[in-house]
Image: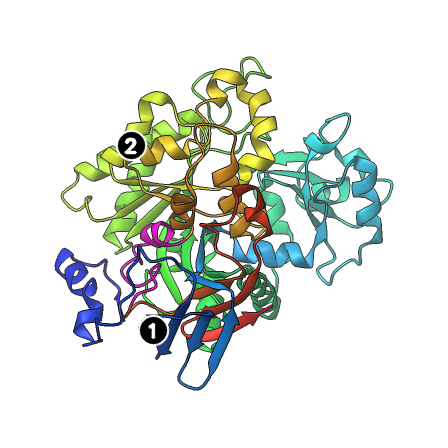
Amino acid sequence: MPCGLLPPRPEQCRERRTIAEEEGLSRQHRHDPSEKLIGMELHLERGRIRAVMPNAVGVVIRTETRTYEFPGCVVLPGFVDNHAHILGLGSRLASVSLHDAASIAECRARLQQAVIPDTGWLQAMGWNQELWSDGRMPSASDLDDLFPTTPVVASRVDGHAMWLNSEALRRAGITNSNGLLVEDERDPVWTSIPEPTEQDLRSRIAAAAQACVQQGVTEVHDMDVAPRVVVVMREMAETGALPIRVQSFVSAQHDEWIDAGLLPAGGEIQRTAGVKLYADGALGSRTAALLSDYADDAGNTGMAILTVDQITRAVRAAIDAGWWCVAIHAIGDAAVRTVLDAYAIVRSWDDGSEILLRIEHAQHVHPDDVHRFAELNVAACVQPTQWVSDSKMALLRVGAERQSWAYRWRSLLDSGALVGAGSDFPIEEVDPIAGIAAFVNRPSSEAITIDQALDAFTSQAHRTADMNYRRGQLDVGYDADLVILDRDPRTTPSAELANIRVMATFMAGQLRYTA
Ligand SMILES: [Zn+2]
């Protein structure tokens, strides 16, 4: 087991990084990373890669019991989605989808067709007023005539705003709202909705994990997870019910992990690795914290949720309890700066140099702050498909100058920062290939190369959970987490990248999906 209850000491890290030598595995069959990817035979044993050798026809995978052949295909390390919400996706798959609805009328029509679940609350996700011709925010009166007695809650596509009917407001005890709540205002609603049962949780997690393997994802960094869900996830991992690996980042905004008595823990399939905090909201609902006013809302600089002092206190508590990874959501330039200021203090502590510090999204980074990621050894965990979905809206919110500071992938890489990638599903789709295409095809100097894009979804994403010594390379001794693609992304014209198909996915040396 690579990780015990305590964060790794430097000497353990050295030990861990020579794992292939320790196991006495043959180095003769090592794959030269400069070789073209096509034509590779891998032998897998006990969940690891035992040998790597060239093959003329395509990909051959030999496990202890079977041989799989994929002529004309390529094999890559399995994709990592380093910022996502597994239960959120499972709940989305189980709830009414308002994604891509073109109007309030279409949202109403979809809700009207839905079956009311056992909880008695109708839940929906995915509305986006930016797609509606009038662009107006919805309110309770848009739902009350259809649902006079059934509570209805519908989350905005960014997950930071909620549209409710009057019955839902009444049951949550909220009297001063027109049916639109953001951030913490929603807390009474969350506590009013009956909790899903453990069986509900299991089936939602299983459905989401299945959606991941179908897209070639073998590992997810699961963000902002309730302690109760971590326990279910761990049990599913131990009983072989998870086809993907999960690094759990537990909710810490309201000391959830402390109240639940949850501690970090290692594990091969599920690992309770870090804590998750929010420093601000999101641009869509104008709750991302900006250094100056929103371009389309004078006098509003958004919602700074945490101060430097609050962050350092939360990180102190995490380190003291043995956590080795902290992830903090920051979208606006003010929030990014606040988190960097707090991380600078953490790095000055005697025990602050080893902990893995991440900024989730890192969407708007002021030019003065770009270099600080590398200097402070802070990982930027970015979501390239959000640029595709949000850049038009973001331009309205922040204006042209500040928009040029947004989604700074190449600037961060050029400065030496660690950049790992994810999708933030269920806000976006589970689709690392779409993410890779978005990284490469962005018409801007912030686009990155195909090699950088692949690394961001594999080896570099593993680095953002300190797992790169085990995964992210097709090399002897590494974990056999693999994706087989119908063509090589490195030689595919960039305009065709999004058409690449996942043919099969292996996790821990076992076939988990085939097309
Ligand atoms: Zn997220």
Q: As displayed, is residue 41 above or below residue 226?
A: below
What residue would you read off at disc 1?
Answer: 48
Look at label 2 and name its amino acid: Ser
* Residue 148 visible (yes or no): no
Across and down, in percent, residue 399 comes to 54, 17
If the image is split into quadrants, where does the N terminus sit? Answer: bottom left
Q: As displayed, is residue 176 above or below residue 107?
A: above
What residue would you read off at disc 2?
Answer: 415
Q: Is residue 375 magenta?
A: no
* Residue 503 visible (yes or no): yes
Residue segment shown in magenta: 458-475
If the image is split into quadrants, where does the C terminus sit? Answer: bottom right
Furthest residue toward right:
145
Q: Residue at x 60, y 27 (%)?
A: 392
- Identify which residue, 501 or 170, lies in the foreground: 501
Task: Kindly indicate the quadrant of the structure image that contains residue 261.
Answer: bottom left
Kind of element beneath mark 2: loop
Across and down, in percent, residue 90 comes to 60, 59
Look at label 1 and name its amino acid: Arg
